[in-house]
Image (cartoon, coloured by chain):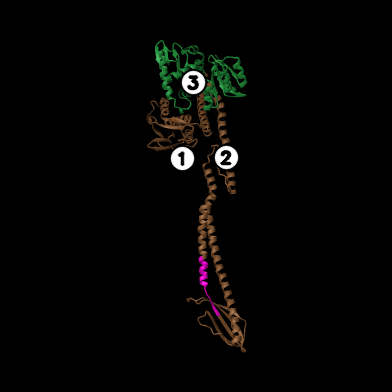
């Protein structure tokens, strides 16, 4: 899947590309307004990651162009301008998601995955894991050992982990993902642990051989069976 | 003391003194005038006596009832005429007496003639002068008081209007001072200076606010880069334990910096009036939503009880959300293990109580930026400052009380008009 990264900060753009490239994404970076316009006219992308403040122009105008041309690409806005007007405006014009800087790369990846799922796989509401199938509509795990219902939090966790397969995800990123970044958690991540414990048990009960590992001092990692075999 | 009172006091003293002095001067002037008149009349009498003596060769007889007294003495030699004043004898009700002594020759003999007359009405004159002065003084005092009451108040009206306009002036509200125009040059000058000052202060304030907002914005990008680099760094399989710990603490600091920056930006935005539009909000529903959101955090750790009545508030929905987030976060963050959170909502007030540290917060400083309840406090110290700012903007009065290890925050607002 091809992604266009419209971000004038080269360092941030590089980080995004190296994080996303481990997945089956091909990322193309552009650093200014005109190159971005050129790219979207010539190529098709699954998703465009769009910064709003760009040299020579505004990201919102690129968004308008994409919408005018009925471009099928999903759009995730990343902006340092964390203002509500920008967010509302962006989403009204037709962006699929809005992420304010600074964000966790894992959060970005989860958002991109979710946008792409919603856009290009319409009707597809299941994700195949090793041995088990995650039903996105029913929010259940269907495996050889049977069907397991997930709570809202467990579902949010597994969806996040699947988007960030084989990557270390921090507690902070998980906490923000589950509660939203307006909630001041004050390093209170115990609740994540409770949900994780239940999710691990349910994965096992469904017969999934993928597992969520604890990375000491860092966070968690969803290790797929394929990768485990390779290691 | 008011300026007019001070001014009045001085003018009244000057008036009283002037009147006393002028009355005295008037009295003495009158007296000397009367004496002159008397002397003239005595000189006339002298001539009449001389005429009489020339014709009759004898002195005229003095009627004892007349106010004129005369005496004749034969002397050896003549002299020049002289006036003498005989002061009133003490204790007796006698008037001033003026006496003219002159010498005349008659039938080859010198006679010393003394004519004297009392100066009548001196007392009456003095009394009259004093009375006139007194009455005039009284009239002037009454008049000046009335003038001050009526005229001065009107004259100073623009001054008071300006002062009250300055009192109502709010920094950063964009509107200058509403100073009235007057016909009085001094007040116009004062108002001009005030307007200029308000303009400058407002300008500086906006520059400063803009700077805060821009600085916070500019910090977002480097923060985003640092965070993304850390996100990448932790993916490395070969990290040693020391490296992990190092990365972890870098993570924690970036997180703190991010939240600090967000809070500062929020404060800047609130004071830049970027959240000015308001609507009627059903607080009860909002609270239920928040309770559900926070249930995750509170589960198994805090006991929550609530008693929510219907309530509505006119405010910005985003700000109300932030406000409730802050209140709820504080109540859970600063709680104790197995603690309690109690919510109570009535028509125009929300009370949120929580168990917590055994000492009360410093009420004079708690709403200041970067206030921390204790040095170990890990929060950025901006939560309550933001709360206060939102309250100020939304017409909510926050208050805090502490009793028996229970910290209570109460928000009060006016019922929205329909």
Q: Which mark is residue B353?
A: none
Which chain is drawn using brown? Answer: B
Instruction: Please name the predominant secondary structure of the magenta segment in the image.
Output: helix
The answer for how far apart the CA atoms under marks 1 and 2 are is 26 Å
- Tell me where the magenta segment starts and ends, as one range: B116-131
Q: Position of residue A197 (x, y in %)?
A: 41, 19
Circle nearer the N terminus (1, 2): 2
Q: Chain of mark 1?
A: B
Q: Do circles 3 and 2 both sit on a common chain?
A: no
Front in this rendered view, residue A224 or B76: B76
**Quarter of the image that includes the C terminus of chain B:** top left
Which chain is drawn using green? Answer: A
Q: Do circles 3 and 1 both sit on a common chain?
A: no
Q: Is residue B26 left or right of residue B387?
A: right
The answer for how far apart the CA atoms under marks 3 and 2 are is 49 Å
Q: Residues within 10 Å of mark 1 (few under 14, many from 20)?
A: few
- The residue wearing badge 3 is A169
Q: Do circles 1 and 2 both sit on a common chain?
A: yes
- The residue wearing badge 1 is B364
B111 shown above or below B135: below
Q: Which mark is residue B201?
A: 2
Q: Residues within 10 Å of mark 2 (few under 14, many from 20)?
A: some
């Amino acid at each position: 899947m091809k992604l266009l990264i419209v971000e004038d900060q080269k360092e941030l753009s590089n980080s995004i590309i190296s994080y996303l490239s481990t997945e089956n994404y091909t990322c193309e970076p552009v650093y200014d307004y005109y190159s971005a316009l050129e790219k979207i006219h010539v190529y098709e992308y699954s998703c465009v990651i769009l910064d709003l403040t760009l040299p020579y122009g505004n990201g919102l105008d690129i968004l308008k162009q994409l919408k005018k041309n009925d471009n099928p690409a999903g759009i995730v806005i990343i902006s340092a301008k964390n203002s509500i007007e920008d967010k509302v405006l962006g989403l009204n014009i037709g962006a699929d998601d809005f992420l304010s800087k600074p964000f966790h790369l894992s959060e970005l990846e989860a958002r991109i995955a979710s946008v792409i799922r919603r856009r290009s796989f319409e009707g597809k509401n299941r994700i195949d894991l090793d041995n088990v199938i995650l039903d996105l509509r029913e929010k259940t795990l269907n495996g050889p050992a049977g069907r397991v219902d997930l709570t809202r939090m467990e579902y949010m966790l597994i969806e996040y982990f699947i988007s960030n397969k084989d990557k270390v995800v921090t507690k902070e990123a998980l906490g923000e993902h589950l509660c939203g970044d307006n909630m001041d958690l004050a390093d209170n991540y115990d609740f994540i642990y409770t949900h994780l414990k239940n999710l691990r048990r349910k994965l096992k009960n469904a017969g999934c051989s993928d597992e969520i590992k604890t990375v000491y001092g860092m966070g968690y990692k969803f290790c797929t069976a394929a990768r485990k075999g390779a290691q | 003391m008011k300026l007019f009172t001070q001014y009045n006091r001085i003018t009244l003293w000057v008036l009283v003194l002037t009147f006393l002095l002028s009355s005295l001067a008037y009295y003495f002037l009158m007296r000397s005038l009367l004496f002159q008149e008397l002397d003239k009349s005595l000189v006339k009498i002298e001539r009449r006596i001389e005429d009489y003596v020339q014709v009759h060769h004898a002195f005229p007889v003095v009627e004892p009832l007349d106010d004129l007294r005369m005496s004749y003495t034969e002397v050896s030699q003549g002299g020049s005429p002289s006036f003498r004043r005989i002061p009133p004898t003490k204790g007796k009700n006698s008037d001033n007496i003026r006496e003219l002594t002159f010498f005349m020759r008659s039938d080859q003999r010198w006679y010393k003639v003394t004519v004297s007359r009392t100066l009548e009405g001196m007392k009456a004159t003095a009394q009259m002068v004093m009375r006139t002065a007194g009455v005039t003084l009284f009239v002037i005092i009454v008049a000046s008081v009335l003038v001050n009451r009526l005229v001065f108040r009107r004259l100073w009206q623009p001054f008071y209007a300006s002062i009250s306009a300055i009192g109502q002036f709010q920094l950063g509200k964009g509107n200058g001072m509403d100073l009235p125009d007057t016909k009085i040059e001094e007040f116009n000058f004062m108002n001009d200076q005030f307007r200029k000052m308000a303009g400058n202060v407002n300008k500086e304030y906006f520059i400063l606010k803009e700077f805060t907002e821009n600085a916070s914005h500019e910090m977002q990008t480097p923060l985003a880069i640092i965070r993304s680099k850390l996100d990448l760094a932790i993916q490395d399989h070969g990290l040693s334990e020391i490296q992990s710990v190092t990365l972890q603490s870098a993570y924690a600091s970036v997180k703190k910096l991010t939240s600090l920056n967000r809070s500062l930006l929020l404060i800047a935005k609130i004071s830049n009036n970027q959240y000015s539009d308001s609507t009627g909000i059903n607080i009860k529903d909002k609270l239920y939503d928040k309770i559900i959101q926070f249930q995750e955090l509170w589960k198994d750790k805090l006991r929550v009880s609530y008693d929510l009545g219907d309530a509505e508030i006119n405010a910005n929905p985003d700000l109300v959300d932030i406000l409730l987030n802050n209140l709820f976060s504080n109540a859970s963050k600063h709680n104790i293990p197995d603690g309690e959170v109690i919510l109570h909502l009535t028509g125009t007030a929300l009370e949120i109580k929580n168990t917590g540290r055994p000492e009360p917060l410093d009420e004079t400083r708690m709403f200041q930026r970067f206030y921390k309840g204790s040095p170990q406090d890990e929060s950025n110290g901006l939560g309550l400052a933001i709360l206060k700012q939102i309250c100020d903007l939304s017409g909510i009065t926050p208050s805090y009380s502490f009793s028996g290890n229970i910290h209570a925050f109460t928000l009060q607002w006016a019922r929205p008009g329909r």
